[in-house]
Image (cartoon, grey):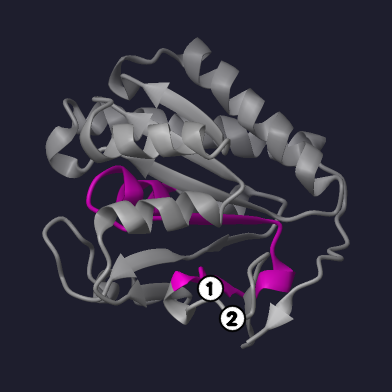
Amino acid sequence: MNLIYKNVNKNINKYDIIFIKDYLNYDIGFISGFQTGIDYEGLKIIDNLRVKCSKRISLSGFTTYKNQAGEITIDNFSKYTSIVKLKNISYNKRTVLNLTYSDITLIFADQLNGGTLFTYKQCKNKNKKVFLLDKISEKNTDDLITIANELADYTNNKINKNKSIVINIAGNRLQKLYNYNKVLNNINKFFEIFIDKINKKIKPVYNTNNNFEL
């Protein structure tokens, strides 16, 4: 397997790079900070749904070198060999790296505060594309359809121009989710709507991205 890195200087520190598994062979990549709650559950939902998607989806992301509180250990997701451990790195720096090396940050939040609010503010400060689903446990189907369609349209537009796209999943950690089951149900419903529209609208892709091999 070749590890490819995207849109970064060759001289950048290797721990500041998101590695994408089989980069040239996917259309949509999903990453997260790999924390308990939205980060972890979002990737699990995508993993379950990607068999329904006509486009190639990869999963990768950041975790910390030490097993800090709230982090998912690499062993919990060992089948995803593209997950990268970052040594001695703060949550804030990891958050900034994730949104920097992704095209879109998708935030699911019951409470827009703490690290989740930091993520949202950083997206705005750095003029990065962000989709926010605040009070996610209270969203009705129409709310989910509206934002999922917006995300799908944006994604389709990129892929139809022969560009792959990386989506960063972010949000509250487990302890800050009011209604865990309702949150997971709505996130699952959101991604089902998203994938359904991707399948209907997207055209065949011939990936011509220029990438650097490590």
Q: Nearer the viewer, residue 110 or 180?
A: 110
Q: On the rendered structure, is 55 left or right of 130?
A: right
- Viewer-nearest of discs 2 and 1: 2
Q: Would you identify the image quadrant in which residue 109 lies? A: top left
Label 2: which secondary element: loop
Q: Would you identify the image quadrant in which residue 193 lies? A: top right
Residue drawn 64% across the image and 79% down it? 10
Label 1: which secondary element: loop
Residue drawn 45% across the image and 26% down it? 132
The boundaries of the magenta stretch are 16-45
Residue drawn 61% across the image and 88% down it? 1
Three-letter residue code for mark 2:
Asn
Residue drawn 52% across the image and 29% down it? 131
Q: Residues within 10 Å of mark 1 (few under 14, many from 20)?
A: many
Q: Position of residue 72 (x, y in %)?
A: 23, 63
Q: Residues within 10 Å of mark 2 (few under 14, many from 20)?
A: few
Q: Position of residue 118 (x, y in %)?
A: 32, 37
Q: Would you identify the image quadrant in which residue 163 lies? A: bottom right
Q: Is residue 146 above or below residue 74?
A: above
Task: Give the number of callouts.
Answer: 2
Q: Earlier in the sequence, mark 2 or mark 1?
A: 2
Residue receiving disc 2: 11
Q: Which mark is residue 19?
A: 1
Q: CA distance from mark 2 to mark 1?
A: 15 Å
